[in-house]
Image (tube, rainbow, N blue to C red):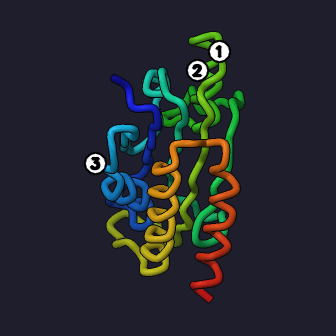
């Protein structure tokens, strides 16, 4: 049976703060049977099949441009040219889902965790580690509710709490 919630973590542990995705994935593994966690270096067109039969999906990735500790948003299918490169965006993957299956993908969200240093061979920075802890709490909370209808509101509240705690 396919778990209703998919958490797809993207990142490379050899590139400093890019490790936050895989590290969050490992923290969520075994959460419960309603959540499947997948991690990979990058999205490929083949990953479109991982969305089939889900009630919701969360993509997790490091991001140098979002606010600390994280940014959580609902995303939609968007045509871009990333399918022609070595890696796809979550938006392009949703667009591909629509093309392949003739239907919209399940409700899909993007959890961007603020990173700072992405150099090959760098360790996880202290700031990114703090952001990862906050994002892991959020992801665990969201997966525990299994109701994507209120995920955005819960994420906004959690982000405000985390920012206040870091000040």
Percent from the top left, x then y, of residue 5? 46, 37
Residue assigned mark 1: 103
Q: Is residue 153 left or right of residue 33?
A: right
User: Depth-wise, is mark 1 or mark 2 nearer the camera?
Assistant: 1
Q: Residue at x 52, y 52 (%)?
A: 142
Above or below, 26 against 89 in this view is below
Q: Secondary structure at mark 2?
A: helix
Mark 1 crowdedness (10 Å alpha carbons): few <14, some 14-19, many ≥20: few
Among the two numbered marks 1 and 2 on one chain, the one whose residue lies closer to the N terminus: 2
Tell me if residue 139 comes above or below residue 103 in the rendering. below
Q: Secondary structure at mark 3?
A: loop
Residue 83 in the image: x percent, y percent? 57, 27
Furthest toward the bottom, the residue is 167
The secondary element bearing badge 1 is classed as: loop
Give the residue drawn at x 69%, y 62%: 156
Quarter in which the N terminus is drawn: top left
Q: Of marks 3 and 1, which one's residue comes earlier in the chain?
A: 3
Across and down, in percent, residue 136 comes to 44, 62
Q: Find residue 34 and report its horizontal and vertical position in percent.
A: 39, 38
Reading the image, the residue beneath label 2 is 97
Tell me the mark number nearer the camera, choosing from 3 and 1: 3
Query: Which residue: 57% across, 57% down?
Result: 112
**Which residue is tagged 3?**
30
Q: CA distance from mark 3 to mark 2?
A: 27 Å
Among numbered discs 3 and 2, the one appearing first in the sequence: 3
């Amino acid at each position: 049976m396919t778990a209703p919630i998919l958490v797809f973590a993207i990142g490379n542990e050899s590139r400093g703060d890019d490790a936050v995705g895989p590290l969050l994935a490992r923290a969520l593994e075994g959460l419960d049977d309603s959540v499947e966690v997948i991690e990979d270096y990058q999205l490929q067109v083949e990953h479109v099949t991982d969305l089939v039969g889900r009630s919701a999906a969360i993509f997790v990735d490091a991001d140098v441009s979002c606010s600390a500790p994280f940014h959580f948003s609902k995303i939609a299918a968007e045509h871009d040219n990333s399918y022609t490169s070595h890696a796809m965006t979550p938006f392009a993957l949703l667009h591909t889902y629509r093309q392949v299956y003739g239907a919209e993908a399940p409700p899909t969200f993007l959890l961007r965790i603020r990173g700072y240093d992405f150099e090959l061979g760098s360790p996880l920075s202290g700031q990114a580690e703090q952001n990862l802890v906050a994002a892991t709490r959020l992801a665990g909370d969201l997966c525990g509710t299994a109701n994507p209808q209120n995920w955005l509101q819960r994420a906004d509240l959690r982000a405000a709490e985390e920012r206040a705690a870091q000040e």
